[in-house]
Amino acid sequence: MSGVRLGLVPRVLRHLVLMTGTVAMLGPFVVMLMTSFKPKAEIFAPTFHLLPHSWGGTENYATALTQVPLLHFLLNGAIVTAAIFLLQVLVNVPAAYALAKRRFRGRDAMFATVLVCLLIPYQAIALPIYILFFSTEGGRADLVVWNPDERFRVEPAALRHRHALTPYAGRDLYGVVQETYVGGRCVFARV
């Protein structure tokens, strides 16, 4: 630091910018949390209120914990996260030590390769990885043919997953699956 102290106005402006950024970043999480405390009728009401008018949090969280194995999903997430962390520490700490403290032929090229790889976001290579694994000979060819203009009513009893929770229950939506192909075979066809 240069040791020069900012005046009152620049400090206030800096804090206003930081507080605005904080509100912008935390705002969606606050809305999500407050929505979880609202009953269903208030969630789908045409007007928006941040604070719930009536309490629905107990029912919402009880439904989430009983209708869906949410705690099991959280445990799976914790196990996967711990495994990834452990493997990264086991690989990255020795590699970082070798690149920082040891002198060997090709060290600079290897370090440059690591830096370049860190600059590429995973999302940029996800699609090529998918194409690499699934477009090879003998790979799966999955396809869904759907009609975007056909209308249907969402009925929880007709849903094909483990729980029948949906915010669209009883609503009319557009887009109906006509055929589904998995591995090149038709596994579903609307009659």
Image (cartoon, grey):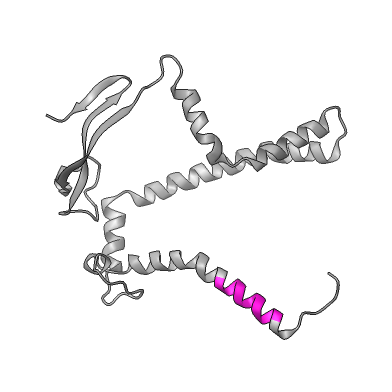
Q: Position of residue 95 (x, y in %)?
A: 74, 36
Q: Main secondary structure of the magenta part?
A: helix
Q: Quadrant of residue 124?
A: top right
Q: Position of residue 129 (x, y in %)?
A: 51, 29
Q: Specify whether 78 is left or right of 61.
A: right
Q: Specify whether 92 is left or right of 107.
A: left
Q: Residue at horizontal 56%, vertical 68%?
A: 21
- For this rendering, which residue is in front, 62 or 24? 24
Number of marks in the image? Answer: 0
Q: Position of residue 23 (x, y in %)?
A: 51, 71
Q: Residue furthest front?
A: 149
Magenta part of the chain: 10-20
Q: Specify whether 179 is left or right of 12.
A: left
- Vertical relation: 38 (above or below) 112: below
Q: Residue furthest bottom?
A: 8
Q: Position of residue 123 (x, y in %)?
A: 53, 40
Q: Quadrant of residue 137?
A: top left
Residue 176 colored magenta? no
Q: Residue furthest left?
A: 191
Q: Residue at horizontal 24%, vertical 35%?
A: 146
Q: Residue furthest top?
A: 137
- Vertical relation: 70 (above or below) 105: below
Q: Residue at horizontal 33%, vertical 21%?
A: 183
Residue 17 colored magenta? yes
Q: Residue at horizontal 29%, vertical 50%?
A: 68
- Vertical relation: 114 (above or below) 137: below
User: If the image is split into quadrants, where does the N terminus sit?
Assistant: bottom right
User: If the image is split into quadrants, where does the C terminus sit?
Assistant: top left
